[in-house]
Image: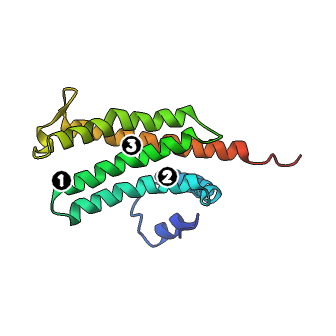
């Protein structure tokens, strides 16, 4: 596990190369903020959800590398990208701290990208993904937009976790 002084160690042994001092300052500041927030929320279920969403990206990439039949991987990945957000929607909707912003963030990914892509992939099972268009947009470009939407969903969840932690934290010095 890294410490907040990790960047000093990396700079001392040359792993950061000739990075500018401004870049290093911004990098260290960002890391310190992340480190403090990570420490606060690492035991929460919300953190695990966010971590799993990020991990799912790497799992899908790994599946594409180890399973030769792309259609099988597309089916596994597509169902994962369908059921994970559905679980998030279910949990958020039933939460006593329900956030309509979080629901909107998850639902935009689900309905604008996951369902259309998965439906079309299943409908045209033997076709190459490159031959598809979605709402007049080439498949590769639509897939890029879906990646941006996925990052937006994760960002909304992360910001929501931070805001909830701030609201639920007891007021100090009273």
The answer to which quarter of the image holds residue 94 is top right
In space, the residues marked 2 and 1 are separated at their CA atoms by: 27 Å
Where is residue 152? Give x, y as percent.
43, 39
The answer to whether residue 144 shows anywhere in this view is yes
Q: Is residue 167 above or below residue 2?
A: above
Counting residues from the N terminus, which is met first, the one under dot 3 or under dot 1?
1
Where is residue 112? Give x, y as percent.
34, 32
Q: Is residue 71 left or right of residue 160?
A: left
Q: Is residue 41 left or right of residue 6?
A: right
Q: Residues within 10 Å of mark 3 (few under 14, many from 20)?
A: many
Q: Nearer the viewer, mark 2 or mark 1?
A: 1
* Colouring scheme, one of rainbow, by chain, secondary structure, one colour: rainbow
Q: Nearer the viewer, residue 17 or 138?
A: 138
In space, the residues marked 3 and 1 are separated at their CA atoms by: 21 Å
Q: Is residue 97 left or right of residue 59?
A: right
Q: Which residue is mark 3?
A: 150
Q: Which residue is mark 2?
A: 50
Q: Residues within 10 Å of mark 1 (few under 14, many from 20)?
A: some
For label 1, the SS is: helix
Q: Residue at x 14, y 45 (%)?
A: 125
In space, the residues marked 2 and 3 are separated at their CA atoms by: 11 Å
Q: Which residue is mark 1?
A: 71
Counting residues from the N terminus, which is met first, the one under dot 2 or under dot 1?
2
Where is residue 174? Give x, y as percent.
89, 46
């Amino acid at each position: 596990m890294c410490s907040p002084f990790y960047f000093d160690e990396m700079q001392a042994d040359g792993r950061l190369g000739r990075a500018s001092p401004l870049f290093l300052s911004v990098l260290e500041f960002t890391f310190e903020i992340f480190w403090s927030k990570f420490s606060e929320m690492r035991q929460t279920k919300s953190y695990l959800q966010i971590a799993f969403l990020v991990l799912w990206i790497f799992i899908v990439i790994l599946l594409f590398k180890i399973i030769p039949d792309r259609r099988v991987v597309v089916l596994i990945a597509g169902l994962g990208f369908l059921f994970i957000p559905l679980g998030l929607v279910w949990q958020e909707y039933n939460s006593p701290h329900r956030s309509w912003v979080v629901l909107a963030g998850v639902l935009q990914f689900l309905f604008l990208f996951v369902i259309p892509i998965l439906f079309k992939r299943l409908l045209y099972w033997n076709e190459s993904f490159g031959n598809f268009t979605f709402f007049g947009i080439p498949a590769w470009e639509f897939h890029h937009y879906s990646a941006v939407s996925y990052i937006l969903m994760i960002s909304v969840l992360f910001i929501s976790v931070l805001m909830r932690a701030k609201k639920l934290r007891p007021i100090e010095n009273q």
